Image (spheres, rainbow, N blue to C red):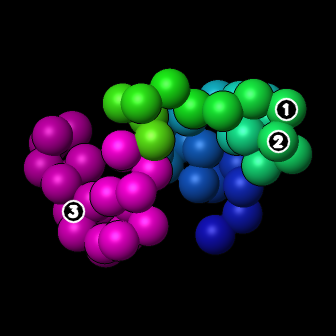
């Protein structure tokens, strides 16, 4: 998955994602928790997002 796809799929701004990856900014606590959940179970998070959008 590209960075743009990741940002779009999980609801992040692409520029925001780049800032985090380059160490120029850090995600706030809630977003950090969300990123950890995505990292731990990406397939499960995708399924959860699909249920919400349905």
Q: Quadrant of residue 23?
A: top right
Instruction: Please state the horizontal and vertical placement of residue 46, each as a whole percent of the image.
Output: 31, 61
Q: Residues within 10 Å of mark 2 (few under 14, many from 20)?
A: few
C-alpha span from label 2 to label 1: 4 Å
Give the percent coordinates (x, y) of residue 39: 44, 67
- Quadrant of the rendered image containing residue 53: top left
Residue under numbered circle 1: 24
Task: Tell me residue 43's x, y (percent).
Answer: 31, 73
Quarter of the view holding residue 13:
top right
Q: Are marks 2 and 3 in contact (CB under 8 Å)?
A: no
Q: CA distance from mark 2 to mark 3?
A: 29 Å
Magenta: main secondary structure equals helix
Numbered-mark total: 3
Q: Secondary structure at mark 2?
A: loop
Disc 2: which residue:
23
Quarter of the C terminus within the rendering: top left
Q: Tell whether position 32 is magenta.
A: no
* Residue 12 seen from this side: yes
Question: Neighbour class for label 1 at 10 Å: few (<14), some, many (≥20)?
Answer: few
Name the residue at 45% across, 41% down.
32
What segment carries the magenta color?
33-54
Badge number at residue 43: none
Circle 3 SS class: helix
Q: Are marks 2 and 1 in contact (CB under 8 Å)?
A: yes
The residue pinned by badge 3 equals: 47
In the image, residue 30 lies at what x, y percent?
36, 30
Distance from label 1 to label 3 (Cα)? 31 Å
């Amino acid at each position: 998955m590209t960075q743009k796809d990741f940002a779009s799929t999980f609801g992040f701004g692409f520029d925001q994602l780049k800032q985090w990856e380059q160490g120029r900014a850090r995600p706030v606590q809630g977003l950090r928790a969300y990123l950890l959940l995505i990292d731990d179970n990406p397939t499960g998070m995708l399924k959860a997002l699909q249920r919400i959008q349905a």
